[in-house]
Image: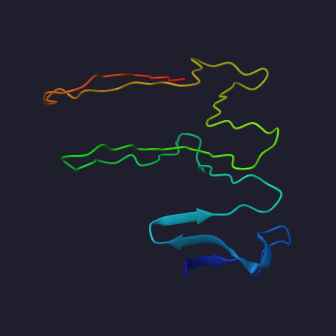
Amino acid sequence: MPYQIIQNKTLPADAPAGGSALFELSGSTLRLKAVADDHLRIETMQDGKSLRLNSRNVTQATGDHTAVSIKPNKSADGTGSVTGLEVSPRFAAGSGGGNLRAILADPVLKASTGDLTGQVVAVECNI
């Protein structure tokens, strides 16, 4: 049975049904649940801070490492679409600023990086 970190005993009526946990930890899987009529939102509290996922030193010597994997799988027949990743940075109306980039891909080889046996690729798209 999953370890339930926080249960919604005092949350609004639109919280997950049946008093189920908002956060569950089962093995190495962390489940975050949103209220029934809304998206799950993860936001930083300060404007100058970013959301970082798996930004750490990887110390394994062999085997591949993928920092983030997003693989939605639509398993019901119908007319709905699937979008794997949507990125829409923007300036508000009447606001100025510097650069605006939807995606920045910047592979970095540190000064003392050892020999690589493969390619250095910024973006690879396959169909």
Which image quarter: residue 110? top left
Asked if residue 66 is positioned above or below residue 19 in the image, the reply reads above
Q: Nearer the viewer, residue 2 or 126?
A: 126
Image quarter where the N terminus lies is bottom right
Q: Nearer the viewer, residue 120 or 102?
A: 120
Q: Position of residue 3 (x, y in %)?
A: 54, 79
Asked if residue 76 is positioned above or below residue 21 in the image, the reply reads above
Answer left or right for 4 relative to 63.
right
Q: Position of residue 39 (x, y in %)?
A: 74, 52
Answer left or right for 107 relative to 36.
left
Asked if residue 17 is positioned above or below residue 90 in the image, the reply reads below
Residue drawn 50% across and 24% down?
126
Answer left or right for 62 relative to 122.
left
Q: Position of residue 111 (x, y in %)?
A: 17, 26
Answer left or right for 111 relative to 48.
left
Q: How many marks?
A: 0
Asked if residue 115 is positioned above or below residue 2 in the image, the reply reads above
Q: Position of residue 50 (x, y in %)?
A: 52, 42
Residue drawn 78% across and 74% down?
11
Residue drawn 62% across and 52% down?
42
Q: Nearer the viewer, residue 117 or 37?
A: 117
Residue drawn 71% across and 76% down?
20
Q: Nearer the viewer, residue 41 or 26?
A: 26
